[in-house]
Amino acid sequence: MILLLALPWAIFSSGMEWFVLVPLFPFWQPLFTLLQPYWIGLLVHASSALMYPLFARLRWARDAAAARDLRFTEAWLAGALALMVMLGIVAVFGSHGYEPPWIGRDKDADQTYMRHMTTHHAQGIELARIAARRAQARHLQQFALLMVASQTGENRLLANWWLSWFDTAMPDCSSDERAVMPGFLTLTEIKLVKLAPPDQFDAVFVEMMIRHHRGAVKMADQMWHSRGDPRLRVMAHAIRHEQQGAIALMHGESGLAAVVTATRNMLGDNVN
């Protein structure tokens, strides 16, 4: 009964968070809430809900519950432990470059996306590192560091998948590919960011990074609707949502001000 009640409650609580609290008070939420897809929050709530029956079991004495209830909770506990062990094994093998084989239906499209998004992220990391050093607003510096962390992690995952799936090093993108890549900035535009006067840097960086993010959203959206490997498509969906959330935070003066609140919510009192 606890389990049957807990799962609808997980759906309700995650739905309230995403469809009510975030739209009504978007910048009162922790930053990760704005940058994550809805289904990640739902998985978190549902995973917690699946553990609720075990809490009741912890309060029972050996003879204080019906044998049927004891058998159910013990089987549920065994299943939960088995799932955690399985996920742990998958994580350990994945951290050493051993992933389940590629299972998509369009290898060329998947390889092109992985190469392009890795190159696109590398430029985003370069821009964000400049902002981490030069941004006048402290909150923009902190937000730039978060961009560096998230996109570096995504590039590492893409590199691990490529090596595991295709057993070769990932080739670089050519200059022609970079020229037609959505949102990929030219050398002149990168130089414009690097040489922007201090009092204009924040505005120039935000304008260029929004353009860059919109290109990533377009690329990720195409992958999400492709016939590629399901893991790559799910990751593309998450990247699309993350980049859209970042655009919302950076868009205009109100977006910059919102970064202050969002970053403080995530990082606490260390952000001044």
Image (cartoon, helix red, strand yellow):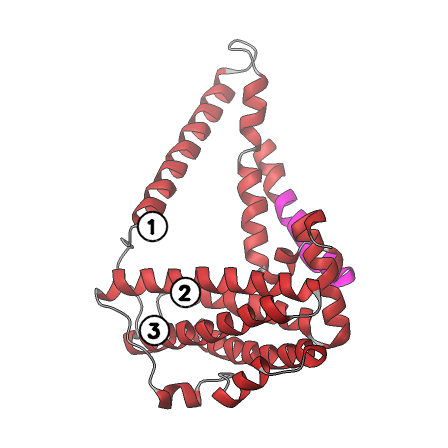
Residue that numbered label 3 is attached to:
110
Name the kind of residue labelled 3 in the image: Asp
Nearest the camera: 34 or 176?
176
Q: CA distance from mark 3 to mark 1?
A: 21 Å
* Mark 2 element type: helix
Kindly report which numbered mark, 3 or 2, lies closer to the viewer in this rendering: 2
Magenta-highlighted residues: 8-26
Q: CA distance from mark 2 to mark 1?
A: 14 Å
Residue that numbered label 1 is attached to:
95
Is tag 3's residue or tag 2's residue first in the polypeptide sequence? 3
The vertical placement of 75 against 218, above or below, is above
Q: In the image, residue 157 lies at what x, y percent? A: 38, 60
Is tag 2's residue or tag 1's residue first in the polypeptide sequence? 1
* Mark 1 element type: helix
Residue that numbered label 2 is attached to:
155
The vertical placement of 197 against 82, above or below, is below
Query: What is the crowding at mark 3: few (fewer than 14 residues within 10 Å), some, or many (at least 20)?
Result: many
Instruction: Please state if 80 lies on the left or on the right of 38 as rendered.
Output: left
Q: In the image, residue 215 lies at what x, y percent? A: 52, 80
Q: Which image quadrant: the N terminus? A: top right
**Residue at image location 60% in from the left, 62% down from the top:** 35
The vertical placement of 31 against 109, above or below, is above
Query: What is the crowding at mark 1: few (fewer than 14 residues within 10 Å), some, or many (at least 20)?
Result: few
